[in-house]
């Protein structure tokens, strides 16, 4: 087994001026290649601190991958620090220099003096060609350790990793069995601790490991299996997945790239049914989520964000008497909105939500986060009262995801408005 | 001067399954508070490794801020590790327990056993209230060091940082000279390279520094000044800001927390005008962005996502002859949609967009990314043709931001549909 540590250099990362997407990219790829990564470290453009971080990384990992600090400027020092750590002299590489000169020739510009620095390579190191920039990557193997230096710009780093580093690591990891493969099951309804109650024993497992991740409106259950091949890992995951789906039934709506909107949309398409949505407190988010899915125009006909009472009455045809008697945030209004949207669009199914997203507008009997959602179809009409907590945007999100999940359960015929799985 | 280290915990980060946005957020805020941050470390949900990382961080920094590992589940261990490091017993905090119980009571659910764990606090630690979740944050001051523990979910972590941690650190840093203060100007219209052309000389400056950040539909110009006080830094920034706004006029729409929807909304409220929106290719995103702004119900009356031609005709009253003759994606349809939405809602101003978000549906003369946007009011009607590039969600976003910026320019009377600032 090979263990690795990712070291990101760049003062802009320490100041929070840029988001460290390189670390995520490398972490995901290393896992896929069966390389264990236990630590990620970020440090600024300071040679003393860069050295201390790389030395610490070399203590706890076989392989250190760095990004950043390979540029032509004075604060680009990663290469020099690594050479220093291993006591390697820097040698000018004529091939690299020729490539850099060609790079500038193609752009019809003279090569600045300081780019010559980029042709200096620690003695005995391998070159990782960079087709999109002037900084070559470098692989240093010394004292039983490996350091791989990559440039910071993602559009240079990623192709260099795929073209040279990934095959290099694949060779190395063949001796160490094991790829790491993951699948994420997505749950809407029960909260994180309820999900854990149901999976407690499974969470002890070590292969596949099972981890919970709480999102704003979902809980993700991530299964990660280590095996000698992806195929084998997938088989290991499949067994656990079936058990988890059974225990959390019917609240696992999908996996990995699926979203609640794409799953509900697929069901509508399969059943050749059309949809309309009438939104008050979600303010268009349900329509937005549905229409993020390619092909949604096949089943999604109409969304109405009826923010004013006039819009509810005149566009959706909600009886003004209902609005007067029960108020805009009421089960009666929610159902009338759903009926109105369905009629207006000539849709098979219509969803409606009305509620108080806050921060203002709440009262004793109608607090912020109170939401009524309704579903209307030819065979069924239902209204449900919900209470959410959080800021305005959070309440909008939780409401929209819950409503789309409600639609999914209606379309699969699993109904039930509980947010607790049937007790195991 | 206080030095800090950010420690992010979570196996999902090591596996590259989620992007570490917390570290960026904290890094940016710490810099703004004059806290120097030299290292960021990421570690998985493993108590031994978490301990080694926090101990190392305590060696090299006065202050350690952790995110993650405060949940109710078995792999949430950060709090326990920190208590162990300082030899502090864990004590059940009745107030915290009461808050957690109330949290579940409000949701009408029994509190799962495992949530009791979240009420265990290292002896003598301060509590950071969490209004959006059950995990309280914790401030431990011991052996001349400070450890601040925050939960992983950004929507819980950020408000806790702003409400409790930022003021706490501000008190501490008064003694430390030198604060780093930033302001971000937000630009919609010109692309990053056009902005760079106009600011080239300013980008050389060292204090304040000026950096460009390209977003999906915006360019952010970030000014960062180092001074002895926030007040002084703000004054240094103000000078540069005026010059940048002049050069990029009229495309700097706001700064920092402002969004194009909040700025356009504020103008509508100030001018006591109401708005309606008719959306096709944006599918509700414009309504969603507008209604993310608290108080938007004062001016936003109605949004219609007319995804089908029938909806365009029957709901918005678009003449079927127009749809037949010019097609759904045409300037004529866009204008008819805007007029229809304005009439339907009885609004002062209406926006409309119709286009091809893709990936399907494009043709030779009407390619993916082609969008017509219209604005209709009593005094003005205008239609504009736009061409965007990118995937479906990117095209939706670019369109929505452009349309809202168009509304802003109409409301400020700055009009003009150029995306290049007046040459400097």
Image (spheres, coloured by chain):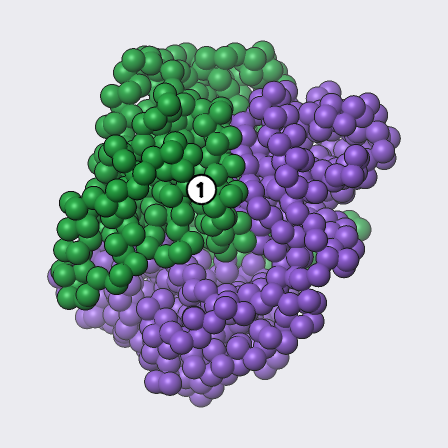
Chain colours: A green, B purple
Q: Is residue B178 visible?
A: yes
Left/right placement of residue B40 relative to residue B305 reads: right
Residue at 64 percent of width and 25 percent of height:
B51
Q: Please tell me which residue lies in front, B171 or B61.
A: B61
Give the secondary structure at mark 1.
strand
Q: Is residue A4 above or below residue B57?
A: above
Q: Position of residue B319 (x, y in %)?
A: 30, 71
Q: Please tell me which residue lies in front, B240 or A221.
A: B240
Q: Please tell me which residue lies in front, A117 or A153.
A: A117
Q: Quadrant of the C terminus of chain A?
A: top right
Q: Is residue B411 visible?
A: no
Q: Is residue B265 above or below residue B98?
A: below
Q: Quadrant of the N terminus of chain A?
A: top left
- The total of numbered circles placed on residues is 1
Left/right placement of residue B345 relative to residue B279 reads: right
Residue at 32 percent of width and 38 percent of height:
A89
Q: Is residue A50 above or below residue A106?
A: above
Write down the chain letter for disc 1.
A
Which residue is outermost to the bottom? Answer: B379
Q: Which residue is mark 1?
A: A8
Q: Position of residue B60 (x, y in %)?
A: 63, 39
Residue at 49 percent of width and 17 percent of height:
A209
Q: Is residue A266 above or below residue B241?
A: above
Q: Please tell me which residue lies in front, A183 or B331.
A: A183
Name the image quarter holding residue B131.
top right
Check disc 1: other Cα within 10 Å, few if <14, some if 14-19, many if 20+.
many
Q: Position of residue B344 (x, y in %)?
A: 47, 71
Residue at 61 percent of width and 26 percent of height:
B52
Left/right placement of residue A170 relative to residue B172 reads: left
Name the image quarter holding residue A328.
bottom right
């Amino acid at each position: 087994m090979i263990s690795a540590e990712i070291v990101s250099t760049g003062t802009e990362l320490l100041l929070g001026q840029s988001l460290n997407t390189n670390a995520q990219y490398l972490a995901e790829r290393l896992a896929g290649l069966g390389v264990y990564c236990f630590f990620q470290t970020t440090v600024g453009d300071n040679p003393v601190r860069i050295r201390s971080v790389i030395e610490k990384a070399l203590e706890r990992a076989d392989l250190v991958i760095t990004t950043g600090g390979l540029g032509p400027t004075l604060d680009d020092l990663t290469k020099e620090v690594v050479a220093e750590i291993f006591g390697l002299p820097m040698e000018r590489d004529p091939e690299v220099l020729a490539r850099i000169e060609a790079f500038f020739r193609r752009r019809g510009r003279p090569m600045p003096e300081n780019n010559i620095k980029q042709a200096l390579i620690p003695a005995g190191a391998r070159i990782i060609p960079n087709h999109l920039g002037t900084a070559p990557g470098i692989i240093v193997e010394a004292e039983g350790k490996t350091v791989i230096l990559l440039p910071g710009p993602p559009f240079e780093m990623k192709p260099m990793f795929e073209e040279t580093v990934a095959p290099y690591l694949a060779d190395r990891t063949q001796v160490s069995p094991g790829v790491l493969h993951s699948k994420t099951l997505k749950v809407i309804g029960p909260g994180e601790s309820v999900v854990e109650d149901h999976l407690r024993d499974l969470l002890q497992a070590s292969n596949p490991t099972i981890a919970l991740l709480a999102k704003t409106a979902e809980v993700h259950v991530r299964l990660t299996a280590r095996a000698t091949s992806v195929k084998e890992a997938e088989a290991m995951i499949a067994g656990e997945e079936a058990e988890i789906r059974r225990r959390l039934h019917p609240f696992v709506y999908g996996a990995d790239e699926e979203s609640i909107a794409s799953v509900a949309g697929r069901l509508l398409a399969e059943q050749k049914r059309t949809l309309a949505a009438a939104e008050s407190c979600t303010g268009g988010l349900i329509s937005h989520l549905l229409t993020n899915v390619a092909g949604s125009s096949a089943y999604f006909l109409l969304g109405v964000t009826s923010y004013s009472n006039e819009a509810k009455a005149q566009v959706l045809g909600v009886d003004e008497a209902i609005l007067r008697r029960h108020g805009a945030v009421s089960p009666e209004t929610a159902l009338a909105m759903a009926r109105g949207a369905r009629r207006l669009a000539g849709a098979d199914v219509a969803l409606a939500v009305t509620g108080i997203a806050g921060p203002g507008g709440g009262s004793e009997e109608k607090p912020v986060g109170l939401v009524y959602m309704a579903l209307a179809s030819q065979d069924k009409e239902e209204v449900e009262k919900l209470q959410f907590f959080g800021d305005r945007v959070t309440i909008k999100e939780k409401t929209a995801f819950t409503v789309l999940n409600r639609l999914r359960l209606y379309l699969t015929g699993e109904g039930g408005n509980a947010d607790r799985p049937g007790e195991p």
